Amino acid sequence: MFNLSGQIALVTGGSQGIGRAVALVLAELGADVAIMARTLEKCEAVAEEIRQAPGNAGRRAVAVRGDMANPEEIKAAVAKVAGELGPISILINNAAITRDGLMLRMKQADWDEVINTNLTGVFLATQAVLPMMTKARKGRIINLTSVVAQMGNAGQVNYISAKSGLIGFTKAVAREYASRNITVNAVAPGFIETPMTAVLNETARTAMLEQIPLKRPGSDLDVAYAVAFLASDEAGYVTGQVINVNGGMYM
């Protein structure tokens, strides 16, 4: 498996779901990990889970509060992580929210909140860590987008606009920083069993599964292992790509 010893990773939205799984896997592979989300207590629970995991003796894990819609909190969180663990070498932009609604009924506040958190927040977090990576002349940035950014989905125009924007953002930053040995990629999960998808009713769940050739939902670990590959030295020649983890839902 990949070796991330000596790496410092920041996982936004790391307190639950895919973010939690990513944080645990990166730590298992040797990285020191910072978990960032809006609820500090949940972040601390994941950090303690990392510290107590078998085989993680000496692994450092810190919890930091940060709202991706708040520029000052993002800056403060990145500074705190760098101060406690060292320069960030792996950034996982995972934090996201949904405020679903049909186009004609969607309030601008719901549009703004999703775009600010899911897209602008990624811009700000990336901007905050790039000076560290540029100085080290090495870095890994992995952005979590979504299968619906590629397929479309009714009732999610704000979420899909943000997640589609992340694909373009990934390619643009990859072009800009390739010469500094900084790779920038995206992972697009499909129907993954997480707290966000747990709210789906049985009708919606069945309809979703019918679109998946593998006929099952994915797990948070399916996504985490794809992220771990992109964070590793073995993925050093992969940049500007979208890795689909969707059971064949989109090809």
Image: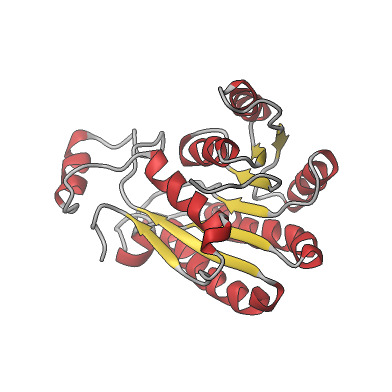
Quick one: 152 or 178, which is closer to the camera? 178
Name the one closer to the observer, 83 or 167.
83
Residue 184 horizontal/vertical position (percent): 58, 66
Name the image quarter holding the C terminus: bottom left
Residue 99 in percent (x, y) is at: 45, 47
Residue 205 is at least partly visible in this image: yes
**Percent position of residue 83, x then y:** 85, 43
Q: Find residue 50 and report its horizontal and vertical position in percent.
A: 60, 28
Q: How many labels does the image show?
A: 0
202 lies left or right of 220: left
Q: Is residue 158 left or right of residue 103?
A: right
Query: What is the residue that sits farthest to the right in this orientation?
Result: 83
Q: Image quarter for residue 26?
A: top right
**Who's the residue at 71% across and 36% down the image?**
65
User: On screen, 163 above or below 30?
Assistant: below
Q: In this view, does 200 lie above or below 152?
A: above
Q: Identify the residue at image location x=76%, y=48%.
A: 78
